[in-house]
Amino acid sequence: MLDEAERTYYALTGVYTELGYELVPLPQVPVEARLRFILAETGL
């Protein structure tokens, strides 16, 4: 199951990158810290 998830992840990130999107990985931290990260990255 993990192999399929990894293949899907790499396929999607490859397509989005080819289309010109800048992908920003989310930190693996508690939800509140992740929310602060997203708000800071988006300027909200």
Image: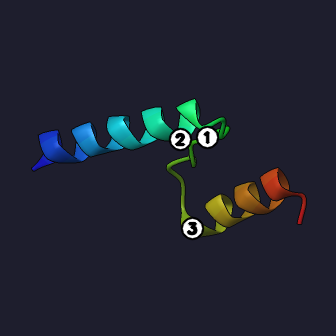
Q: Are marks 2 and 1 in contact (CB under 8 Å)?
A: yes
| Tag 3 residue | 31
* Count of labels in the image: 3
The one nearer the camera, 4 or 35, is: 4
Helix, strand or loop at label 2? It is: helix
Report how far apart the C-alphas of labels 2 and 1 lie in the structure.
8 Å
Image-quadrant location for residue 8: top left
Q: Which residue is depicted at the point 46% across and 38% down?
A: 15
Residue 16, numbered circle: 2
Q: Position of residue 38 (x, y in %)?
A: 72, 59
| Tag 1 residue | 23
Q: Position of residue 27 (x, y in %)?
A: 57, 46
Whether 9 is drawn above or below 14: the answer is below
Tell me the quarter of the image containing the C terminus: bottom right
The one nearer the camera, 36 or 22, is: 22
- Kind of residue at badge 2: Tyr
* Between discs 3 and 1, the one toward the N terminus: 1
Residue furthest out toward the left: 1
Helix, strand or loop at label 3? It is: helix
Badge nearest the viewer, 3 or 2: 2
Q: Which residue is depicted at the point 15% across and 45% down?
A: 4
- Kind of residue at badge 1: Leu
